[in-house]
Image (spheres, rainbow, N blue to C red):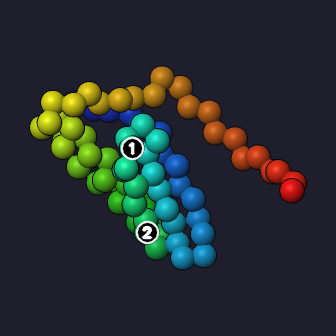
Amino acid sequence: MSTYKFSVVIEKDSEGYFAFCPELEGCYTQGDTYEEVLENIKDAIRLHIEDRIESGEEIPQADAVSLTLMEVAV
């Protein structure tokens, strides 16, 4: 069994939480609580990786991640 590391972005909105993995296009999920969305994204990433391995596709991984919250006035 191999182990991979991915960045995960979790956002809170009025309906709960949304999470996605930037390295894996189309890999996203949602949940009512932070804990639920964290488990859901872990499952989504695992399924995404299993599918890529079965298809013989490359498993992309980030070397470094930087996240900044930026306020922009318009």
Instruction: Give the vertical position of 37 relative to 8 (above or below).
Output: below
Q: Is residue 1 left or right of residue 43?
A: left
The image position of residue 39, as x and y in percent, is 36, 58
Mark in front: 1 vs 2: 1
Distance (Cα) linking label 1 and label 2: 19 Å
- Marks counted in the figure total 2
Q: Quadrant of the N terminus?
A: top left
Q: Secondary structure at mark 2?
A: strand
The image position of residue 45, as x and y in percent, is 32, 47
For label 2, the crowd category at 10 Å Cα-Cα, with few meaning under 14, some 14 to 19 and many 20 or more, is some
Q: Is residue 20 left or right of residue 54?
A: right
Question: Which residue is under mark 1?
Answer: 25
Amino acid, disc 2: Gly
- Tell me what residue is drawn at x 87 percent, y 54 percent: 73
For label 1, the crowd category at 10 Å Cα-Cα, with few meaning under 14, some 14 to 19 and many 20 or more, is few
Question: Which residue is under mark 2?
Answer: 31
Amino acid, disc 1: Glu
The image position of residue 27, as x and y in percent, is 37, 50
Residue 1 in sight in this render: no
Instruction: Give the vertical position of 26 relative to 65 (above or below).
Output: below
Residue 5 in sight in this render: yes
Q: Secondary structure at mark 1?
A: loop
* Of 68 and 38, the residue lying toward us: 68
Mark earlier in primary sequence (1, 2): 1
Q: Is residue 25 left or right of residue 58?
A: right
Q: Residue furthest front?
A: 74
- Tell me what residue is drawn at x 72 percent, y 47 percent: 69
- Tell me what residue is drawn at x 43 percent, y 65 percent: 30
Quarter of the rendering containing residue 15: bottom right
